[in-house]
Amino acid sequence: MNHDPVQRGDRTSTAMGLAAILFWSATIAVSRSLAEQVGALTAAACMLSAGGALGCAYLAVRGRFAAMLRLPRAYLVGCGSCFVAYMACLYVAIGLATSRQQTIEVGIINYLWPGLTLVLAVPILGLKVRAGFWIGAVLALAGVAIAPLRWGEYSPAALVEALRAAPAPYALALVAAILWALYSVLSRRLGGRGEGGAVPLFTLASGAVLAAMRLAMPEESHWTGRAVAETLFMAVFPILIAYAMWDRAMRRGRVTLVAIFSYAIPLLSTLISSVYLGVDVGWNLWLACALVAGGAALGQASVLKPHDVQA
């Protein structure tokens, strides 16, 4: 009997992955609001630097910072590069979005990564699936694709025209989705199932890269009490806590369960963004919800359990 390590995982690590998904659902909305006040690069540099510094300080106090540096070099370099590149692509895409509507579109494209994580887990982690898995993936991705659409003002034709008029935000969001999916599966492949990861270090490195980009491309910033509060929220919850939880979930939790549940992020993110940014969403969001939930259920049912895998 071949007990597939992709299927196993402790419950605490799995729960952490699910909590990370909830925190991340607010990322696009708060990041856009903050970018409008201080600039996308400034916002990202501050959030990531603060989150990374807090995380590294916590590890230093606990005497675990040196252990983080002793993690496999392939994990530190490979996963670290994916992490930093993902952050740069995502926040530049948010900054380049010409409107709040387009920001939601960028968020939806970025949130293709849950499906891509499962797809990449097949060749990289040896995930065993039935044919229905691919049908479920297509259904879920179709739900993600239609989530931001509103017929009329926000029709498919208008979306195509937007792609032609401003392709950079969409292209960067797609690259970001691929990078995060790759980071997620490589964390499991290269990082092992040890107690700690290097998320604080990756986050601090990302902050340094975004700060360098900010110096090269100056932005006009207007700091207010709200901007400071949003920066602290992002630094502590979606960045520091959520990324650390996700890293542990990918290394020690049930990868398939967490990845499939993460199909809900585009829908949660769109709902939060519509309220927080004051952007209306159409009836098709509920159709998207049905497609995503149905596709996720089919994908989960099509993953072979350990006892289904022949030795």
Image (cartoon, helix red, strand yellow):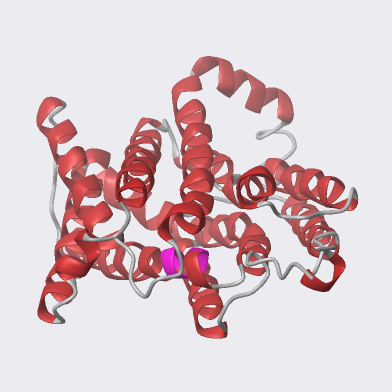
Tally of marks: 0
In percent of width and height, residue 163 lies at: 57, 22
Decide: is 19 above or below 51.
below
Indicate whether residue 25 is drawn in magenta. Answer: no
Q: Where is residue 150 in the image (x, y as percent from the top left)?
A: 70, 41
In the picture, measured across the screen, residue 17 lies left or right of residue 281, that is left
User: Looking at the image, can residue 101 be seen?
Assistant: no
Residue 248 within the magenta-colored segment of the rendering: yes
Image quadrant where one finds the C terminus: bottom right
233 lies above or below 284: below
Residue 251 percent coordinates (x, y):
48, 65
Q: Examine the image and state in which quarter residue 209 appears.
A: top left
Q: Can residue 271 be seen in this view?
A: yes
Vertical order, 180 against 95 (above or below) = below
Region of the chain picked out in magenta, as a range: 246-250
Question: Is 268 on the left-hand or right-hand side of 147?
Answer: left
